[in-house]
Amino acid sequence: MHWNDERLAALPIDQGFRLRGAQVTRIEALTDGAFALALTFLVIVQQEIPKDFSDLMLAFRQTPVFAASFSILILFWSAHVRWSRRYGLEDGPAVALSALLIFTMLVFVYPLKIVFGAFFSSLTGGWVPGATRFQSHEQLQTLFIIYGAGFVLMQATLVGLYADAARRADALRLNALERFDTRADARGHALSLGIAAFATLLALLLPARWSPWSGYSYGLFAVLKPWYWQRVLNRRAALQASESQATSAELPP
C-alpha cells in the first residue's frame, strides 16, 4: 500500500504512532479466532461438567492455572494486535509469520496449562490439582523443554514481525519516533526470547531431577523487562523532546 501525506494525515494516532492498520485485516481476524479457540482449550481440555458440588469446587481450584495460562496467551495476542494496528501488513512475510504464531500457539496451549498445573500443584501442596501425572523426573524435564521451545518460537515470530516492519520503514513512511518504537518492540521480544531460551537450555542441561528449577529462570522477566522498558521510555522521551525543539526552531518567529 502506498502511503502519501494525505493518507498519513488521516490516520488515527495512538501514543504518537500513526495506525496504518486501523481496519481489522484478514490476518488479524484469523489470529483472533485462533487465540479464542486456544482460550477455549484451556477451559475444556481434560475437564468434564461437574457432577456434584465437590466436583465443582475441584474445578474452581484450577482457577489459578487458567488465570496464569490465560495471561500468557493474552500477552502474545496483544503483541500481535499492536503489530497489526500499527503497520497493517498483509504481505508474504506477515502471513507466514502470523501463521507460524498461530500454529505454535495451538500446540503450545497444552504444555502451557500442564506446566502451570504442575507449578501450582507443587506450590499449594496438591490443593490445586495438576492436569497431568508424571511417572519420572525425565518426563517432567521433557515437559519443560517442550514448553520452553514453544515460548521461544512464539517470541521468535513476534521478533520477525516487528523486524520485518522495521525493514519496511521507508515503504511505510515511518517517522523517527515510529522507527524507534518499532526497533524497541523488536528488541523487547528478542529479550523475552533470550530469557526463555536460557530457561530452556537449563532444563536441557540440568540433571532431570533438578530440571524444574529451570522454571525459576522465567523470574528474570520481572527484573529485566521493567529495566528494559524504563530505558526505552527514557530514550523515547528524549527523542520526543529533541523533535519538539527541532520543530520549534523551524517555526517562523
Image (spheres, helix red, strand yellow):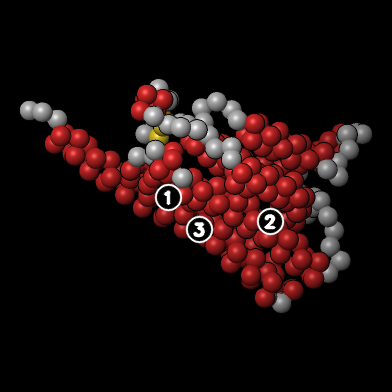
Mark 3 falls on what kind of element?
A: helix
Q: Tell whether 85 sits left or right of 41.
A: left
Give amino acid for label 3: Leu
Give the mark nearest the N terminus, 1 or 2. Answer: 2
Q: Tell whether 176 sits left or right of 74.
A: left
Is residue 7 placed above or below 152 in the rendered structure? above
Residue behind mark 2:
150
Distance from Cα at disc 3 to Cα at disc 2? 16 Å
Give the mark nearest the N terminus, 3 or 2. Answer: 2
**Callout 2 crowding tier (Cα within 10 Å): few <14, some 14–19, many ≥20:** many
Q: Residue at x 62, y 58 (%)?
A: 152
Distance from Cα at disc 1 to Cα at disc 2? 23 Å
Q: Residue at x 81, y 66 (%)?
A: 139
Residue behind mark 3:
191
Where in the figure is residue 221, as x and y percent of width and height?
A: 52, 56
Mark 1 falls on what kind of element?
A: helix
Question: Cβ–Cβ below 8 Å for labels 3 and 1?
Answer: no
Residue 109, can we see it?
no
Where in the figure is residue 44, as x and y percent of width and height?
A: 82, 38
Residue 41, can we see it?
yes
Mark 2 falls on what kind of element?
A: helix
Name the residue nearer the viewer: 191 or 2: 2
Name the residue nearer the viewer: 201 or 63: 201
Q: Which residue is drawn at 61% across and 44% down?
A: 92
Q: In which quarter of the image is the C terminus?
A: top left
